[in-house]
Amino acid sequence: MSDVCLIVGAGDGTGAAVAHRFAREGFTICAARRNGDKLLPLIDGLKAQGHAAHGHALDARDEEQVVRLFAEIEGSIGPVGVCVFNVGGNVRIPIREMTREKYFKVWEMSALAGFLVCREAARVMVPRGRGTILMTGATASMRGGSGFAAFAGAKHALRALAQSMARELGPEGIHVAHLVVDGGIDSEAAHVRQPDRYARHGRAAFIDPEAIAEAYWHLHCQPRTAWTHEMDIRPAIETW
């Protein structure tokens, strides 16, 4: 029975690229997102290439759903060897227009959901003494931009979770790392959202999802004597 790579927040960009990268290395892929129907192209594509893949509808903010998903995977599919938390809700709202409901929704998508998913990953990995937990951060993990109070607060919290878990679980054999994705992900939608940037620099202005997936794979493969616990990724032209 091969190890499982569980990707929570398996969208069409980074999440899908990570799924394909780990599948090529023999992992069984379990991809989860709130709208399970949107996983069908990814799962069908992986299966067409001969990979084992499963799609799961999951609201990662719901503790019962998260606990149940891990129990299902561990009991019926295989041991979770890698857990990638890739959920995030990025909205730009001036602070004077921010409501409690909007702030809380953004916070629970990153901070609360990240805690629930990564806690369950730790619970199944620690008894085995091995495993990798990777959390996707953003520019907002490091600094709060104008209008991004909710997103920055949530991403700062996720980064703090990763730091705490890395220190606690490292001695148990669990590699926890936080990846700061500092830039836009390359996609047709990104080109439309930033037409001037795309016109000046082309695709070099955006981060290739497959390159991000390669970084995730590199982190998983690191020897225990030289673990990286935080990595930042950005295009060469990005101002930072």
Image (cartoon, helix red, strand yellow):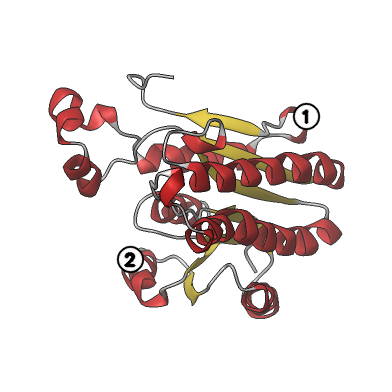
Kindly identify which residue carries mark 2: 45
- 69 left or right of 239? right
Could you say where residue 30 lies in the image, as x and y percent from the top left?
53, 67
Q: Nearer the viewer, residue 96 or 25?
A: 96
Which amino acid type is marked by label 2? Answer: Gly
Q: Which of the two labelled residues, at mark 1 and mark 2, occupies the earlier sequence position?
A: 2
Could you say where residue 19 lies in the image, as x and y percent from the top left?
46, 56
**Which secondary structure lies at badge 2?**
helix
Q: For mark 1, does the 10 Å Cα neighbourhood hold few (<14), some (14 to 19), or many (20 or more) residues? A: few
| Picture quadrant of residue 42 | bottom left
- 193 left or right of 8? left
Could you say where residue 185 lies in the image, as x and y percent from the top left?
34, 41
Vertical comparison of 127 with 56: above or below? above
- 178 left or right of 71? left
Which amino acid type is marked by label 1? Answer: Thr
Could you say where residue 153 lies in the image, as x and y percent from the top left?
58, 44
Kindly identify which residue carries mark 1: 225
Q: Nearer the viewer, residue 89 or 185?
A: 89
The answer to whether residue 67 is seen in the rendering is yes
